[in-house]
Image: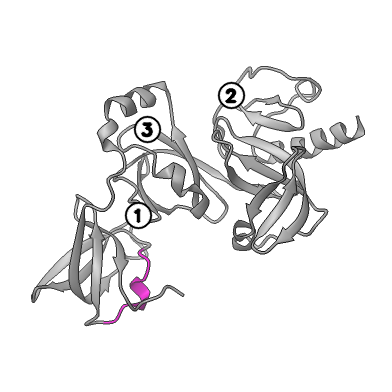
Amino acid sequence: MQRHTIVIAALAIVLGEAGVSLSAESSQRQSAPTSKGTVQDAGGERVVSEPTENLLPGNRLVLGRVNEMRGNQMEIDIGNPQPLFVPQKPAALKGQTFKPGDAIVVTLNDHNAVVDYHHPDEASHHQVLRGRLKTPLTVGLDKAVIETEQGTKTFIVADRARGKLTAMPVGPELLFMADETGHLVDAQLASGRAVQESAENNKARIKGAHQQLRAVFQGAERPSASGPEGGEGRLTVLEQGQERELKFRPPLAKLEHLKKGQDVVLLMDDQGYVLEIATPDVKVQ
């Protein structure tokens, strides 16, 4: 009973910081969702029933304890027969540190994959936004261009979320979750209507980069710092001796490391935007 009380108290703090309501009654017994943002008791965890400002439907917040550190992973006891292993990289990016014996709250998505984790007494500053993918998320790349009510925004997709994000269709409205670093860590169809649109437009799924262009890099013009978020930049290249300007949306990996006259292979979408730069001799630091 004491352990159960501690679990409830810790999760209540976490959910309160996340903007999810938790009633005294729901903390004592399993209950069905009754309103937006409420959660139901699933025995030592909380399940989000409807989208909030920083959690998606189906997200589960599970209280666990760090068993040990193994290389670049943490072994976590969440009360299951088999421990949970999570990468340490997300913690490092957020400046968090863990050690064996620490309590930890793990957020799992509706596919039972780890979305994020943090200390129980630390706020999780996730952000949920609605939008539509403007182009397919290219296989092997890590950038998502999203049309929102506030305009076009570009996000880096976290390594652990690439599998799910590449399954998201272009066109239907989606819910995206970004973590504290601004990287996308989860996504799902926003409504029943979106599910129907996805089924009707199944051909809009991932097709990879639409074009590869071999060229010689000449220079780049980045969006103005005072311009709108998600602004466009320009690359100048030589293609078979002819100068050509190409559009891109930052961030664009390897751009800072290119030198004029360097051979490049540009991966482009069907709207003519450069998605990624491939080079045989440039490494991102």
Q: Quadrant of residue 99?
A: bottom right
Badge 1: residue crowd in 10 Å (few <14, some 14–19, many ≥20): some
- Measured Cα–Cα span from mark 1 to mark 2: 31 Å
Badge 3: residue crowd in 10 Å (few <14, some 14–19, many ≥20): many
Q: Nearer the viewer, residue 270 or 74?
A: 74
The number of discs equals 3
Residue, disc 2? 36
- Measured Cα–Cα span from mark 2 to mark 3: 19 Å
Q: Residue at x 61, y 39 (%)?
A: 108
Q: Is residue 251 above or below residue 66?
A: below
Which of labels 2 and 3 is toward the front? 3
Q: Quadrant of residue 131?
A: top left
Q: Which tag, 1 or 2, sits closer to the chain's start?
A: 2
Q: Is residue 88 found inside the magenta-colored segment of the image?
A: no
Of helix, strand and loop, which one carries label 1?
Answer: loop
Residue, disc 3? 173
What residue type is disc 1 on?
Gly
Which of labels 3 and 1 is toward the front? 3
What residue type is disc 2 on?
Lys
Badge 2: residue crowd in 10 Å (few <14, some 14–19, many ≥20): few
Residue 230 disc label = 1
Q: Nearer the viewer, residue 225 or 241?
A: 241
Q: Residue at x 57, y 41 (%)?
A: 113
| 263 lies left or right of 37 | left
What span is in magenta? Answer: 252-259
User: Does residue 97 show up?
Assistant: no
